[in-house]
Every structure is written in C-alpha cells, then in structure tokens.
Amino acid sequence: MPTPKPLSGYTSYKGLPPLAGLCTVEEAARPGLSVEECVRRLKRFHYCFKRLHQILTARITAEPIYELKTGFAHHAYLCAEHVTALRTRIGEMREPPLGLEDVPHPALEAYFDEILCAPTTQHLIAGLSMQAIGALLVDIEKYQTETNPLTDAPSRRVLRFAILELHELQQFWMSCVVALGSPPNMREWFTTVLDHLLIASGVIVGGSPLAPARNGEAMPRLYSTIPYVYDPVPKRDERFSDPWNQGVNAESFLYNPAYPARAKSLMMLYKRLREIDVPEMMASIITQTPGKPWGYYRDMTRQLWDEARHAMMGEVGFVALGVDWTKVKITLNWSHRLNTECTPMERHGVLYFIEQGLMPRTGKRYEFETGQASELPLIATLQDFDWADEVLHSQIGRVWYVPQFGSLKESLDYGDVAWSKVLSNWATVKEQGLTKHENWWPAVYAMACAAEGVLPDATVLAFDETYEGKRADLQRIAAE
Ligand SMILES: [Fe+2]
Ligand SMILES: [Fe+2]
C-alpha cells in the first residue's frame, strides 16, 4: 500500500498551541505502542515500584543511621504512591487490571531479591541508586518516547511525575553512596549478577559488554540464594547514646500547669524526635502482614512516613533552639519491645489504642496550644501539622484496623490487652546494666536557655521524674 502524503503547511488557528499543549502534530502523527504493549510495560513499572517499596520499608528497622532510616521512609512512601497511580492507569486500559500481582519475569524477581538481600547498607544503597532506580528510569523514559503522546497522554502524565521523583531518589542515594563509600565488590556484583538479571528480564541496560555471569548461570544469584529474612530488631547510630533511657517523663512535665510553655516546647520536641521508633515499628507491621489489599500498604506507608517526619520536626526544632539533640536521650524501648514481643496484629492494636488517646482535648490540640503559648512560631507550626497528621492516622486506623473487630470497643480492648503484655521494663534494663536512666533534662534545658540568653528557671531545672513504675503505654498517651 502506498504511504499517504501528509498535508503540507498545516497550522493551528492563529498560531495557537496545537493539541491542547500535549505535543506537535508531527509527534502525534507518528504511530505508537499498542494498548496491549503499554499495559505489559506499565505492569513492569508497577512491579518495580512495588519491589522498591518493599525493599525500602523492610530495611528501615535495622538500619542504624537516622538519615538513611528517614530516607527509606520517605522513598517507600513515594514508591507506594506511584504503585497506586499505575494501578489506576492500568485499570483504565480496556482490560480489567488482572495480573497486577503477577511477577512479570523471574529474572526481574531475582534482581530485586538480590537488592533486598544486600549484605550491608552500602551494598543496598549502591544497588538502589546505581542499579534499580537507574534502570527503571531508563525503562520509563524509553516508554515516554515510544508511546503516542496524544493517544496515551494519561499514561505519559502519570509517568512524568514518576520520572521526576525517581531522579530525586537517585540523586539522594547517589549522594549517600558518595558520603559512605561504595562496597568493595560492588562492580563484580553488578556485572556478574545484576546486569545479567536485568537483561534476562527484558529491561535493557546499555553500555559496556557484560562480564561472564556468576557461575555461568542464566539466573545468577549472589546474596539471595537464601530467601530474605526481615530483621525486626531496631538499631540506631552512635548519636543515640543511651537507647534504653527512660529517665525523663515528658508527659508529667507537659501536663503540669506549673511549668512554662517555652520549656514544655523542649519536651514536645523530645516527644517528636522519639517518634523515630514509630517507622521502626510500622515497618515491621507492613513487612510481616502479607495479603492485604494494596490500599492497606499505601495508607500504612503514608502514616509511617508521617511519623518519620514527626521525628525530623523534633530534630529541626532542637537545632533551631540551639540544642544539641544528641544530649537528649532518645529511647528505642518501644519499637524494640513491640517488634520482639508482640505479633504484627497486636502492634497495630497498640498503635491504634495510643493514637486514640491523642485525640481528646488534652492530646494534640493541647500540644498545639502549648506551641502557640510558647511564642516560638516554629513550634506552633510543627505541632499544628503534627496534629493534622494524627487526625489522618486515626482515620487510617478506622479503615484498616477497626473493621477486623465487631466493634470499636473490641478493637480498642484488643490494643489495650496487647499493651498489658508489655509491662514496664524500667527496673529490668537498669539491673541489666543497659542504662542508668540518667536525667538528661537539666543539661538540655540549660543549653536552650543559654542559646536564648536567659537564666534557667530553678523549678524547671529541678524537674526529675522518670517513667519508673508507669505502664509502658502511659509514656506514650498524651492524656495520662
Ligand atoms: Fe506522630
Ligand atoms: Fe501517628
């Protein structure tokens, strides 16, 4: 058949931008990918984002370095959002969105297994930034150039946002590789394992020829020969120097009307930074609760990320008030005990039970009003958003936790009972020599006063109440 000749000199009316701003007529006049091929590739991107979400979440708890822990939390959430957007788009493409949970290719599964099982943090972040994220970017960018920009505009829009955030992910993790150094055998792992798996899976990598595959196998594995085992034990870096310390009862101070709002701001910042234990714990629920609808993982990951942000709000607040936060003894007692002594369902129950306690007038509203009363605008901003986030978390609990029970009361009772299993270990950790429960408050308060150029208040300086004898949850519930 002869090829038709395009209309020459075609222009839009009065030189207006054509095609609603999507592209030029020439670009739209080129045929593109079929719907079937688009769905096949979009399902592959969906799988990659799902595996990235899984890897980033699973490695939060046992990662000691705070900046990496919060980075994992952030990017797990971004990946969860891209999974959600791709699921929606695939569902719009004629066929019902069947097979979304299928593995597109066994080599791609092995590829992500390898990164999940990376033996050190350095292997993990090199595998993420220099392999998986980069390969996914190339794959998506290829799609963007090959699909028709007019017919497939909705997919291209979803993917444009994915590209933007994948570039941010790549930059962040590349900077971490530069800061921490790459692992010694990285090149060998890449060229004899990961590159082979990527090519076998149909995701093409360009560049230099491959080294022979490890052991000459078609599906080489190095770190994932034994399936991944999640490590539920939280770890912290050396700035968290006294992780069992329960020596300063923040709530006793916060709810005592005798103390001034400005000093209470410091206690609220301590409570915020201490929340780094929530992502550590929620990562365990998400990782150890398979088989839920995707919306569960998306919502739980959103909450996890919010809690990581709450911790960073604490960090920023301390820095802004001239306080070295490493002098504040941030405990990991809560996430450690829940992750090692309770089931995932019990942990979720405890989380919901605690968050319900944050809603009454003495909870998050009180913290916000205390922030306002402190006359430190930053503290008010932090508490304002912390409160809003907690309202959202309560809604997430109502969607995914409460309906597993016959009534709200039953769901709360379950959380309460789960908490009762974890009695206070204040004396135990002291006897074991894990901590002396040092009262870090006077030094921290004095530091803030020095930065402000005021003399410490003698009564505030003398505060010395610990968590001894308190049921473990009472240190978390706002309304004691
Ligand atoms: Fe929070
Ligand atoms: Fe929360």
Image: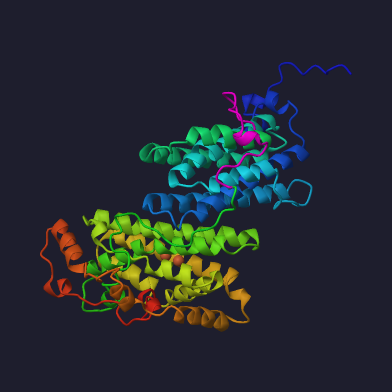
Q: Is 215 in the magenta? A: yes
Q: Nearer the viewer, residue 59 or 211?
A: 211
- For the point 64% across and 46% down, the residue is 109
Q: Position of residue 406 (x, y in %)?
A: 63, 81
**Is 376 displayed left or right of 24 in the figure?**
left
Front position in the image: 443 or 312: 443
Q: Which residues are magenta?
A: 202-224
Asked if residue 64 can be seen in this view, the reply is: yes
Residue 393 position within the rendered picture, expressed as x and y whole percent measured from the top left: 50, 66
- Answer above or below: position of 165 versus 66: above
Q: Nearer the viewer, residue 5 or 30?
A: 30
In the rendered structure, the answer to whether residue 379 lies left or right of residue 41 reads: left
Query: Farthest front residue?
Result: 215
Q: Which residue is situated farthest in the right direction here?
A: 1
Count of picture labels: 0
Picture quarter with ligand 1: bottom left
Magenta: main secondary structure equals loop
Q: Image height check: is 337 above or below 314? A: below
Q: Is residue 408 magenta?
A: no
Quadrant of the snapshot with the N terminus = top right
Quadrant where the C terminus is found in the figure: bottom left
Q: Is residue 383 above or below residue 428?
A: above
Residue 45 in view, yes or no: no
Please give the name of the residue rendered at 13% of the width and 59% of the height, measured from the top-left corner.
Answer: 450
Residue at 54% across / 49% down in the picture?
Answer: 116
Residue 162 x/y as whole percent: 57, 42
